[in-house]
Amino acid sequence: MGFPANGATADQHLKFLIYGKTGWIGGLLGKICQSQSISYEYGSGRLENRSSLEADLAAVKPTHVFNAAGVTGRPNVDWCESHKVETIRANVVGTLTLADVCRERGLVLINYATGCIFEYDQAHPEGSGIGFKEEDTPNFIGSFYSKTKAMVEDLLKNYENVCTLRVRMPISSDLQNPRNFITKIARYDKVVNIPNSMTILDELLPISVEMAKRNLTGIWNFTNPGVVSHNEILEMYKQYIDPSYTWKNFNLEEQAKVIVAPRSNNELDASKLKKEFPELLSIKESLIKNVFKPNQKTAA
């Protein structure tokens, strides 16, 4: 689905307004814009403050808006369990306000959301290859973070100018970044071993820029096709990065004793994205090409 935006087409001058300057995805978006010579500015307004967003749009006059802001919690989503109002303000009120302001001006909003709103069930069993589709109703509200994300996604369906990208367990070639899923699990004492859909940012963030150029809207499972397990990733880490690396597993019951909120585990069906971008690599292919091989020189 495309939106007849007031902004530029791919052949005209583009100008992006990006929210989330201090965040991981927001920072990477700026670098992509620089590499593609796309004019961009970071928003200074607070998402929940409508007048500040209107001031940003009036000053920047963007052709497209990107929302990479929001609350995920530090060091993890457990933070949201004890900061519920702050989480609602950023993830629900703020996102809806930005979508509404953009709609008033006929602007497409690329909204980086989450796919951590599903969990394996009888219709989508682990290991079956049957993934959740864009139109499926979220079935995971085990964490307050996921609960707010499912809530705002449902409301955003009514905004025809919004492109919702369901990101999962994001990974990049920067293995020093503490937000990187690989970096996280490589530092854990123990990890669960469950196959999941994941998002390789090096490959998919440039695709999100292309989606803006095409004025694509609606919900998209924004992951590489297929699933990969924690152990498979750590085996690649051992092979390409650190031959001496070792790790231990534990099960979900043991994990539950050391976390506050349950975690989402699922497979998302990425066929819609693959149809639009046939060059999209599977998760395991993308991990090797975009993450591990570029870092292989660090191996002993």
Image (spheres, rainbow, N blue to C red):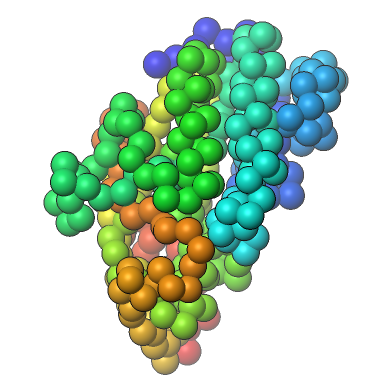
Q: Residue at x 43, y 73 (%)?
A: 257
Vertical relation: 163 (above or below) 35:
above
Give left or right: position of 122 versus 132: left
Closer-to-camera residue (36/40): 40
Give left or right: position of 261 versus 62: left
Q: Residue 135 in the image: state x and y as whole percent.
A: 31, 27
Closer-to-camera residue (35/258): 258
Quarter of the figure with residue 286: bottom left
Closer-to-camera residue (139/31): 139
Q: Quadrant of the N terminus?
A: top left
Quarter of the figure with residue 108: top right
Residue 35 seen by the camera: no
Give left or right: position of 163 versus 235: right
Vertical relation: 175 (above or below) 55:
below
Q: Residue at x 49, y 32 (%)?
A: 151
Q: Residue 181 in the image: state x and y as whole percent.
A: 48, 63
Residue 52 seen by the camera: yes
Q: Residue at x 46, y 83 (%)?
A: 189
Vertical relation: 243 (above or below) 54:
below
Q: Residue 164 in the image: state x and y as whole percent.
A: 48, 30
Quarter of the figure with residue 34: top right
Q: Residue at x 25, y 50 (%)?
A: 120
Q: Give the tally of numbered discs.
A: 0
Q: Residue 56 in the image: state x and y as whole percent.
A: 81, 24
